[in-house]
Image (spheres, helix red, strand yellow):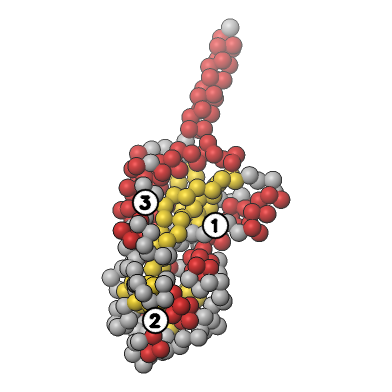
């Protein structure tokens, strides 16, 4: 009888531990440098409220995050672009069903060194600069000074989005300097007098200057700010994505629900992104 009671007690303890383990949030998130500071702050806030939760967040670029998601080394891929067809096919071939969630929006800002007298550019002028056709600031009303253009590297979702929505799918010029991270681009533009680059809105700092942009050939120039992004008058606004496997829905649901909640969207605004509500 004693043996049976001991065995039953052991089984009950194992079941309790198993149930507790299932409720513990343990998530790996990887990908977009644009989404990185938002995910870090959301994870930090969530873990303060949920002491047993463990969420690790690393960057590397949207392409890096999605590749890790495809090979199973991360639970959530964060991306500043939609998943490519080639990436979708890899998941399909592996028999992996996935979900896409928009967690926030971002206004993509074109930045220059504060010493630059240029305050605004048309989309066509920006295209000319980043495709290499426009090489001197005097060609767009600035000083007689060489343009030094910085871009994110090709694994970045921001690189892809900028190419598609600002350059009209034109190729970047061969002289464009590719940067491994957004922070590196901000630093380079701040230290180089003739520099120009592009960053997510939340990365704006006082040591660089954001330009007003025109998408109607110079009739109106719109400043990148929260108000203009929310009323959709600023033309370069993009969604920020999370991707996760359908089979992991229960594992990630609590955290994603938190991000989409009123409290989570408040964090979106605090970090400098555009909330969904």
Q: Residues within 10 Å of mark 1 (few under 14, many from 20)?
A: some
Q: Of 119 and 91, which appears nearest the observer?
A: 119
Residue 119 place in picture, x, y as percent: 31, 78
User: Marks 2/3: CA distance?
Assistant: 30 Å
Q: Of 50 and 140, which appears nearest the observer?
A: 140
Picture quadrant where residue 10 is located: top right
Is label 1 in a helix, a strand or a loop?
A: loop
User: Marks 2/1: CA distance?
Assistant: 29 Å
Any part of residue 126 in sight: no
Is label 2 in a helix, a strand or a loop?
A: strand
User: Marks 1/3: CA distance?
Assistant: 18 Å
Query: Which residue is depicted at the point 54% across and 57% down?
Result: 82
Say which label, 2 or 1, has the lower sequence index. Answer: 1
Residue 275's tag is 3
Picture quadrant where residue 209 is located: bottom left
Residue assigned mark 2: 195
Residue 252 place in picture, x, y as percent: 50, 41
Residue assigned mark 1: 82
Q: Report whether 79 appears left or right of 218.
A: right
Q: Is residue 203 above or below residue 258?
A: below
* Residue sticking out furthest to the top: 1
Query: Which residue is depicted at the point 56% across and 45% down?
Result: 99
Residue 151 place in picture, x, y as percent: 47, 74
Query: Which residue is depicted at the point 46% across and 86% down?
Result: 134
Q: Of 191 and 162, which appears nearest the observer?
A: 162
Q: Report whether 112 appears left or right of 3.
A: left
């Amino acid at each position: 009888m004693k043996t049976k009671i001991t065995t039953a007690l052991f089984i009950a303890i194992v079941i309790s531990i198993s149930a507790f383990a299932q409720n513990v949030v343990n998530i790996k998130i990887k990908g977009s440098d644009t989404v990185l500071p938002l995910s870090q702050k959301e994870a930090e806030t969530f873990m303060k409220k949920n002491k047993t939760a463990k969420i690790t967040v690393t960057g590397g670029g949207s392409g890096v995050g999605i590749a890790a998601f495809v090979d199973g080394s991360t639970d959530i891929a964060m991306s500043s672009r939609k998943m490519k067809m080639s990436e979708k096919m890899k998941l399909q071939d592996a028999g992996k069903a996935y979900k896409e969630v928009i967690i926030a929006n971002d206004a993509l800002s074109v930045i220059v060194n504060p010493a630059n007298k240029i305050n605004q550019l048309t989309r066509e002028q920006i295209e000319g600069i980043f495709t290499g056709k426009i090489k001197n600031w005097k060609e767009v009303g600035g000083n007689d000074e060489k343009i030094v253009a910085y871009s994110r590297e090709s694994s970045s979702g921001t690189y892809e989005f900028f190419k598609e929505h600002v350059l009209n799918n034109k190729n970047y010029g061969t002289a464009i300097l590719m940067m491994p991270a957004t922070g590196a681009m901000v630093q380079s533009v701040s230290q180089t007098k003739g520099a120009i680059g592009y960053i997510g809105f939340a990365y704006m700092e006082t040591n660089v200057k954001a330009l007003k942009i025109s998408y109607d050939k110079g009739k109106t120039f719109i400043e990148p700010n929260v108000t203009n992004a929310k009323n959709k008058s600023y033309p370069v606004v993009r969604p920020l994505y999370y991707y996760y496997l359908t089979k992991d829905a229960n594992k990630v649901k609590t955290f994603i629900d938190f991000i989409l909640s009123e409290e989570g969207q408040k964090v979106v605004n605090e970090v400098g992104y555009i909330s969904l509500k």
